[in-house]
Amino acid sequence: MTQKKPTHHTQADPHAEREAEKYEKPVPSREYLLQLLEQQPGPVSWETVADALDIQDEDRREGVRRRLIAMSRDGQIASNRSGDFGVLDKMSLVRGRVIGHRDGFGFVSPRDGGDDLYLSHRQMKKVFDGDEVLVRETPGGFRGKREAAVVRVIKHNTRELAGRLFRENGICFVRPDNPRINLDIMVAADKTAGASHGQYVVVGIVTQPSRTSLPQGEVTEVLGDHLAPGMEIDVAIRNYGIPHTWLAGLQSEVDAIADEVREEDKVHRVDLRQLPLVTIDGEDARDFDDAVFCEVLKDDSWKLLVAIADVSHYVRPGSALDEEAHSRGNSVYFPDFVVPMLPEKLSNGLCSLNPDVDRLCMVCEMRIDVDGRILDYRFFEGVMRSHARLTYSQVGQMIEERGKRSSGLRKQFAALTPHLDNLHDLYKALRGARDRRGAIDFETTETRIIFDESRKIERIVPVQRNDAHKLIEECMLAANVCAAELMELSELPMLYRVHDTPKEEKLSNLREYLGELGLRLPGGAEPQPKDFQALLESVEGRPDAHIIQMMLLRSMNQAVYQPENRGHFGLDYRAYAHFTSPIRRYPDLLLHRALRWLVRNGSANERMVAKKVHVEPGAKALPRERILPYDMPAMIQLGEHCSMTERRADDATRDVVSWLKCEYLQDHVGEVYRGVISAVTGFGLFVELEDLYVEGLVHVTALPKDYYRFEQAHQRLIGERSGARYHLGDLVTVQVARVDLEERKVDFAFGELLSKTKKKPNKPDKPNKIRRLVRALWKWPWSTSESAKGEVETPPEKPRKERKERPAPGPGARKSRGRRRPSGNAKSAPPKRNR
């Protein structure tokens, strides 16, 4: 090493005291060793590191060696064949997470950001989707992406998965249902748990994949037969590793909690039981974590109370309940089924604001002026009693009938309608402020799957949003903004909901797409939320408005949880956090703990913070280590974990909805639907069905007979002979031709072009000599069988043969999933607000 040796490493190591508390003979902290290695031009031996730190004691030198090996094992640093250690970037290594592709190749998403690296089919034989790896960039590339080779797997994240068991020629193997995993799992004949051929099973991975061998496992659970009711949820839960059984020891904690709120828990709280707070949720909601009340003040401003179930009172840090909630991260809402973050005794009982029972709550009280500006706010602990459990449909109807002769609902809830009318007036003010601010308002259409008694899909219907939905959404947004601002004032380490500005590459792709439609995104190089909103408003009413909105959504970054506040781009908030759903989101529970600590220790806080909280006389202060034992490094890890569990839930839910919609269409093969062309490729058109929001492929051979040329820049297919043009966003009719449930694919036969999107005028084509020759050849009484890239000639039509289910190919011979996009790209959101 070239750096000057410190006389004692404890003088330079900022974490020396921490290490001294842990070990009798302390060694340098990981942070300090990493800092030292970063200063070196290349890898160095462990002896060199120990010498540089002037460590002579043999036990401590051995401690340095073991710590460096552990850091290498955990991917913080890397070691070479000589046993030297170095930081990753100076050894040309990248740490990241594997993302599998249904076609067998994959990518590595770098941990520290940057573009993904391509992994070939050969490299993907060594890993599963989701594994954490060290890779080294290699010569070559794939569609403009850098290519990499796997150097080492840091962590295997696939311990079990779901799939179908097949028996062939005395060999047993499980074919994973997860399309991102293209490796079959070999299973010994005596390790199948009695599963029959074709049944869905859960297989535990015994031996991970390698370059020379397939992974091996044993069946740990038999889920049941193919297409059994509810199988799609059982499979998704296992595929995505969603915790669904409660920890041992948790039930004893739950049993120790009283069935009703104890009297001693109600003291030292603001008593709101006489205030007509109400919950407003969907018809099928079972947990109610927010209640609202609004009244007009003398200066014509509004006082808004948002009361949220006080989950933090029952779920304490370090408890089994807390460990389970942390592991789950959030509730997962499947169609007609929920995997809750908390046990039912809390989620549907003590922490659910059910009507006519006492409940503990954390309250955000706001004063809002006629322009929708929050003038002041404060947080406090309360005890409340919901005066009604209302639904969006009920409140929406009462809003519509306001000023008319009293209807049945307005008569039934006569005592509450003045407060509901106040809420609606406040909503209009908040909505006006939002419009002036320029926040993006994506009007995504959700679908609801209706089952019959045997859980067979009866129908799929769009969910209509009314003013009641939007009213509650605005109230929750206001409370979340106040909570984020208070966290900033307090300077406590806490998770913000961060939505970064769109990346330049995504903006460039979006502008290219919009240009072909004759549209423009204003705002120059750095468009603001108001520019996106202006574009959304300009396409309202177009048949392709939904597709344009989806393209805008794809240009956005995914919102994440992190302790560094970087604002929320989409909502155009300087600071934003999640406060309103602690029953179903762990970040909200963390925020409640911080709020309770601030409330209970209000007098000890800075004056600005103390003004924003209220504590009742006699309430005891809470030690921070008891309720908020988190530092910044811990909060960073919590943010990464909660962001991961949110993505996990979204992916699992999307997969289940895709399965169910494919299953639904299996019973509707031959039927004709309207849809919009959602993507154009050289091999055909992807069409998304109206109302159902299921995507399928019209292969180029299913289009009217012609010789088609794909123009990627214009996102269209053009028939050379007929001049027919099929463009992104065109409205068409299609017939359901085939459904492959295992692959989640739908094939359509083309019907007719109903209407074309408005596009910018294109200059007349100037065909070159080759194109003129091709056109001339079409006039001759023969056809060519040759095709160029992006150009396909459809063969003469012939009767379709009935497709029969083929037997599964042998282990390892995965059938190609083809250049296909998954069908059923449904927008399925949780039943509550999750901005």
Image (spheres, rainbow, N blue to C red):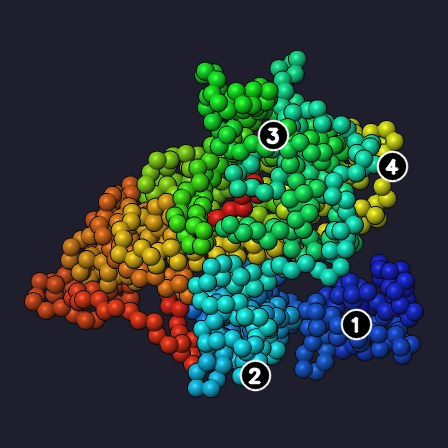
Between the C-alphas of marks 2 and 4, the distance is: 61 Å
**Residue plotted at (88% across, 31% down):** 618
Kind of residue sitting beneath label 1: Arg
Kind of residue sitting beneath label 3: Ala
Q: Nearer the viewer, residue 379 or 535?
A: 379
| Labels 1 and 3 touching (C-beta < 8 A) | no
- Residue 789, position in %: x, y? 29, 66
Q: Nearer the viewer, residue 587 or 583?
A: 583
Pointer 2 residue: 190
Q: What number is the disc on residue 281?
A: none
Kind of residue sitting beneath label 4: Lys
Q: Is residue 641 visible?
A: yes
Secondary-structure class at tag 2: helix
Lower sequence index among marks 1 and 4: 1
Q: Nearer the viewer, residue 31 or 189?
A: 189
Nearest to viewer (mark 1 / mark 3): 3
Quarter of the figure that contains the N terminus: bottom right
Q: With respect to residue 175, does 723 lie above or below?
A: above
Residue placed furthest toward the bottom: 170
**Residue 710 found in image quarter:** bottom left
Pointer 1 residue: 67
Secondary-structure class at tag 3: loop
